[in-house]
Amino acid sequence: MSVPISGIWPCDEGSFLRDQARGGLTVRKWCRRHRLREPAFYWWRRQLARRDAETTFVPVRVTEDRSADGGGRIEIVLGGGRRIGVCGPVDRQTLADVLAVLEASPC
């Protein structure tokens, strides 16, 4: 659960960091003005930088659908080169749950 810090929520996606940078104030002065403890500012800055560093995009190659039933097929390449093929319609949440388990397990 997110806990507000002097009216600043972590789900603001770093808008307070951009606000501080654009405002021209030092971090210390900005924190005083917004009643935010300076260590909390730096903590959020590290957390958001770490999260952004972990966000990756993967290449997607779209090919012609050659399946006989037209249900479609996708192949997902996991870390370590492991591959999983998915055929036909699949519930999005179920697929997300399966991929989370596979990515977390050292197979």
Image (cartoon, rainbow, N blue to C red):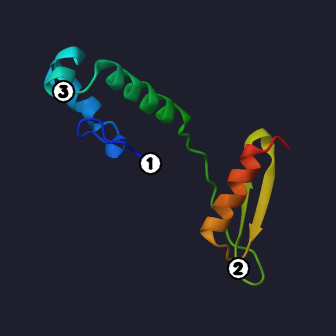
Residue 68 quadrant:
bottom right
- Considering the numbered disc 1 on the image, is that residue within a helix, a strand or a loop? loop
- In the rendered structure, the answer to whether residue 26 lies left or right of residue 83 reads left
Q: Position of residue 42 (x, y in %)?
A: 36, 21
From the top left corner, tell me how far across and down residue 48 is, in percent. 43, 32
Q: CA distance from mark 2 to mark 3?
A: 50 Å
User: Most extreme residue toward the bottom, as rendered?
Assistant: 69
Q: Which callout, 1 or 2, points at the residue further toward the start of the chain?
A: 1
Residue depicted at 72% across the width and 76% down the height: 88
Q: Quadrant of residue 69?
A: bottom right
For discs 2 and 3, the disc positioned in front in the rendered view: 3
> Closer to the N terminus: mark 1 or mark 3?
1
Image: 32 above or below 50: above
Label 2: which secondary element: loop
- Residue at 53 percent of width and 39 percent of height: 55
Task: Please name the residue that numbered disc 3 is placed on.
Answer: 22
Query: Image point 29% across, 36% down: which residue?
Result: 5
Q: Distance of mark 1 from mark 3, alpha carbons?
A: 29 Å
Q: Are marks 1 and 3 in contact (CB under 8 Å)?
A: no
Three-letter code for the amino acid on which mark 2 is drawn: Gly
Mark 1 highlights which residue? Answer: 1
Give the x, y percent position of residue 17.
28, 29
Let me know if residue 4 appears in the view.
Answer: yes
Q: What amino acid is found at the position of numbered circle 3 in the picture?
A: Arg
Label 1 to label 2, Cα distance in Å? 39 Å
For residue 28, above or below residue 79:
above
Find residue 71 and name its label.
Answer: 2
> Residue 17 has which mark?
none
